[in-house]
Amino acid sequence: MKKKIVKGILSLGAVLFTSIALTTSAYACYFFLYQPEEPKCLREE
């Protein structure tokens, strides 16, 4: 009985952490692809 409960908690934790990791990586990819326009004062012309 105790092993079943522990296994269920660990499975729930694995699902939770996997979903957090996927969400975070998707946000990081979106943030990395965003290229704001370079300010004029930083341009080398």
Image (cartoon, rainbow, N blue to C red):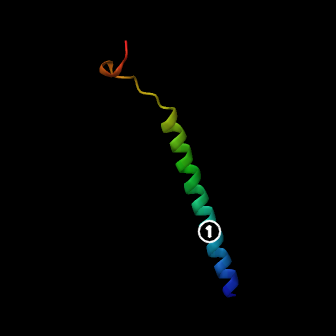
Q: Quadrant of residue 16?
A: bottom right
Q: Is residue 19 above or below residue 42?
A: below
Q: Is residue 32 above or below residue 35?
A: below
Q: Residues within 10 Å of mark 1 (few under 14, many from 20)?
A: few
Q: Residue furthest bottom?
A: 1
Residue occupying the point 46% across, 28% down: 35
**Which one is in front, 44 or 27?**
44
Query: 18 left or right of 36?
Result: right
Q: Is residue 39 above or below residue 5?
A: above
Residue type for callout 1: Leu
Q: Residue furthest front?
A: 44
Residue occupying the point 66% across, 75% down: 8
Residue occupying the point 52% across, 32% down: 33
**Which one is in front, 43 or 5?**
43
| Total count of labels | 1
Q: Residue furthest left?
A: 41
**How far across and down, in percent of the image, does residue 43 sit?**
36, 18
Q: Quadrant of residue 37?
A: top left
> In the rendered view of the protein, which quadrant contains the C terminus?
top left
Reading the image, the residue beneath label 1 is 12
Query: 29 left or right of 41?
Result: right
> In the rendered view of the protein, which quadrant contains the N terminus?
bottom right
Q: Is residue 20 above or below residue 9?
A: above
**Element on which disc 1 rests:** helix
**How far across and down, in percent of the image, does residue 41 sit?**
29, 20
